Image (tube, rainbow, N blue to C red):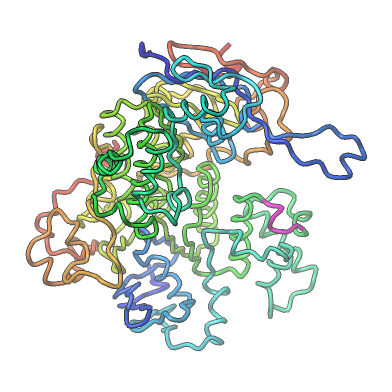
């Protein structure tokens, strides 16, 4: 649907976390087990767009983001940023690429160094990445702060002196300091109160437009994702099950899981109350994954085929991909 | 409908050095039999302290300094701890946000449920039967086997179910649920909401539901109070609140939601931040952030007024807020 340039290209990406063997496992010669946090994920993000990533906790959204910025080791697959394969970059080359992709974290309380003033936090990034020369740093810091709605006087304060909303503004300023073209925002408004959340969402939208940022926006709040993202991907147990334009996904979801997720999100309308739960049961353990389609044990439309064969991602309509046997 | 609980002009203050933090400042509301009464507001607005006051769980340096809490017509404020224990956990039960911190990590679920049966003269068999019945009621599979498990062996959603089972063990008339679904995923939140709604109807109890999430309010409550800076600023039935909010703060909260059907370019925002409860401005606490604020608002504190029957609002600008549109017409 978008003719734009591909900025982020992820192909067959896998991230695994090994589980420590216990002594009894070694004696019994059991094979090493691992959690497949990201399991064969492929998608593209186009220039200037925001891709929403939704799913329940533990589905691998955050690990996926961290793998893309190379904070987690990828086990297999490739990551391309601006057409360049960065999957195996090391040292200096990696640092140079990191400049173009930055993360905004959920909890501005724990992601900022409490012993550094706002000025020091931002100046450090300018120094490390050599964005500007040393004597230009103070001006640049003020410019970045102003962009994020913070004033000069705040630069000399410590993170502890700010409210949650202001702290998240500092978190955003820190991410923007390196001049990135890709922003990965991991639940950036989840810890904030409703009235503050709206301010930060507006700020992110404004910055994305002004700086022409490409964004991957992770949230468990579907309303927020729907508001901010042009395209959305739904994840379940480490796999993307559906990806498409946000409006289509929210009004006419095709994968049973996407539908359930949207249905479960509380409607802000007291005249439309849910009488029965959208889905029974919980997400199974990611250690012993079910055979076939990962969603089949909970799927209301499970078929015989789903129990054995893993469905592949297929493009059903233009720009609308889904991994489900129902649509083959 | 009959009143089960009536709170009149409740004041819960915290004394920190020479500062007085007015966590709850003159809240009045009633909870009717068989209804779910919601209290909604942002962090620090006093919604949780209101609940803790009803349970009389306010600790030093906090104190209930004024007002009355009438439970079935009897004021519980002057009751001693010992007398209160006959009500708390028996007539009035509570569940909180973090099931892991409210459950004892080194006690089996069995023993934690049995605690509620103390002084009931039940045999071991009767206790087990009742515990299994409770776990089955809240939807825990193979309840008999799971009685011997510890809290860490359950998932977050299951732990919250266990909390609910423990709270319901004494057949309470009032359940206080303080952000019961906030720590849970949407699908689990949806299950727990349906479960509480269901159990409330089956057992005919009343629920006070505290949350910051207007979606949860819409799905669960019959009536709602909106709190801001320790005060109830608006109170009415849920449908009216969502269709015709009258307080500028309620309106702002609804409009700043991404689901509020607002402008695609920019969300409505309430400028500024929540005030410090120790240094509240004179007059209406919301005035510095309010688009309607007049000179009077900065001088004089508004008193709750009945704007329409059963619709209480504390605002000087009622004549200007009658045209405010809520979310329901927008969503439809």
x and y percent of residue A59 in the render? 58, 35
Taking depth in this image into account, of B295 and B222 the one nearest to the observer is B295
The C terminus of chain B is located in which quarter? Answer: top left
Provide the residue span drawn in magenta: B149-154
Taking depth in this image into account, of A328 and A121 the one nearest to the observer is A121
Residue B265 forms part of the magenta stretch: no
Q: Could you say which quadrant of the image residue B238 lies in?
A: bottom left
x and y percent of residue A210 in the render? 25, 29
Compared with residue A142, is residue A313 higher up or lower down, i.e. above or below? above
- Residue at image coords 30%, 25%: A212
Residue B152 forms part of the magenta stretch: yes
- Residue at image coords 30%, 51%: A155
Compared with residue B256, is residue A164 higher up or lower down, i.e. above or below? below
Q: Is residue B326 rendered to the left or right of residue A120?
A: left
Outermost left residue: B295
- Residue at image coords 50%, 43%: B186
Compared with residue A16, is residue B285 higher up or lower down, i.e. above or below? below
x and y percent of residue B109 in the render? 71, 62
Q: Is residue A64 rendered to the left or right of residue B136?
A: left
The N terminus of chain B is located in which quarter? Answer: bottom left
Q: Is residue A205 rendered to the left or right of residue B111?
A: left
- Residue at image coords 79%, 54%: B145
Q: Is residue B165 rendered to the left or right of residue A105?
A: right
Taking depth in this image into account, of A84 and A8 the one nearest to the observer is A84
Taking depth in this image into account, of B167 and A23 the one nearest to the observer is A23
């Amino acid at each position: 649907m978008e003719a734009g340039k591909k900025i982020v290209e992820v192909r067959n990406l896998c991230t695994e976390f090994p589980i420590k063997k216990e002594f009894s496992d070694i004696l019994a010669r059991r094979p090493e087990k691992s959690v497949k946090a990201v399991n064969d994920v492929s998608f593209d993000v186009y220039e200037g767009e925001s891709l929403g990533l939704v799913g329940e906790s533990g589905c691998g959204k955050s690990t996926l983001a961290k793998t893309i910025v190379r904070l987690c080791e990828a086990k297999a697959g490739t990551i391309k940023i601006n057409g360049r394969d960065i999957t195996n970059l090391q040292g200096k080359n990696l640092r140079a690429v990191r400049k173009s992709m930055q993360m905004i974290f959920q909890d501005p309380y724990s992601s900022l160094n409490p012993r550094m003033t706002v000025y020091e936090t931002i100046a450090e990034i300018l120094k490390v990445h050599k964005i500007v020369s040393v004597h230009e740093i103070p001006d640049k810091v003020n410019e970045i702060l102003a962009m994020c709605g913070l004033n000069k006087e705040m630069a000399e304060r410590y993170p502890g002196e700010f409210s949650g909303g202001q702290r998240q503004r500092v978190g955003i300023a820190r991410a923007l300091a390196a001049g990135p073209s890709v922003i990965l925002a991991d639940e950036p408004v989840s810890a904030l109160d409703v009235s503050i959340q709206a301010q930060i969402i507006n700020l992110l939208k404004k910055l994305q437009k002004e700086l022409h940022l490409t964004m991957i926006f992770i949230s468990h709040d579907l309303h927020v994702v729907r508001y901010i993202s042009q395209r959305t991907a739904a994840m379940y147990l480490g796999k993307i099950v559906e990806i498409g334009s946000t409006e289509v996904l929210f009004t006419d979801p095709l994968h049973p899981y996407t539908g359930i997720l949207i249905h479960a999100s509380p409607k802000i309308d007291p005249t439309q109350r849910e009488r029965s739960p959208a889905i029974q049961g919980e997400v199974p353990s990611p250690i012993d994954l079910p055979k076939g389609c990962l969603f089949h044990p909970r799927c209301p439309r499970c078929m015989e085929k789903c129990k054995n064969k893993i469905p592949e991602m297929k493009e059903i309509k233009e720009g609308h991909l889904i991994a489900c046997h129902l649509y083959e | 409908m009959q009143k089960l609980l009536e709170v009149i002009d409740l004041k819960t203050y915290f004394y920190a050095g020479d500062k007085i933090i007015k966590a709850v400042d003159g809240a009045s509301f009633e909870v009717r039999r068989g209804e779910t009464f919601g209290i909604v507001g942002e962090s620090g607005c006093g919604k949780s302290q209101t609940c803790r006051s009803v349970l009389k769980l306010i600790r030093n340096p906090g104190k209930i300094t004024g007002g009355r809490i009438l439970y079935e017509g009897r004021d519980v404020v002057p009751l001693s701890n010992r007398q209160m224990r006959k009500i708390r956990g028996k007539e009035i039960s509570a569940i909180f946000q973090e099931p892991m911190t409210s459950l004892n990590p080194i006690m089996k679920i069995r023993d934690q449920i049995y605690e509620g049966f103390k002084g009931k003269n039940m045999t071991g068999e009767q206790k087990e039967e009742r515990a299994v019945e409770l776990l089955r009621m809240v939807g825990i599979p193979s309840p008999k086997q799971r009685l011997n498990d510890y809290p860490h062996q359950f998932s977050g959603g299951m732990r919250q179910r266990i909390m609910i089972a423990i709270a319901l063990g004494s057949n309470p008339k009032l359940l206080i649920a303080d952000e019961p679904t906030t720590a849970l995923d949407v699908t689990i939140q949806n299950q727990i909401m349906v479960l509480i709604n269901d159990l409330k109807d089956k057992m005919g109890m009343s629920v006070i539901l505290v949350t910051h999430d207007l979606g949860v309010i819409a799905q669960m409550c019959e009536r709602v109070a909106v709190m801001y800076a320790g005060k109830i600023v608006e109170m009415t039935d849920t449908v009216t609140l969502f269709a015709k909010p009258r307080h500028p703060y309620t309106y702002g909260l609804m409009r700043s939601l991404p689901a509020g059907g607002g402008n695609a370019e920019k969300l409505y925002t309430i400028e500024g931040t929540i005030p410090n409860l120790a240094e509240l401005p004179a007059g209406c606490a919301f005035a510095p952030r309010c688009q309607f604020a007049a000179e009077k608002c900065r001088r004089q504190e508004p008193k709750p007024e009945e704007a329409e029957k059963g619709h209480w609002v504390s605002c000087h600008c009622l004549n200007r807020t009658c045209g405010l549109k809520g979310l329901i017409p927008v969503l439809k």
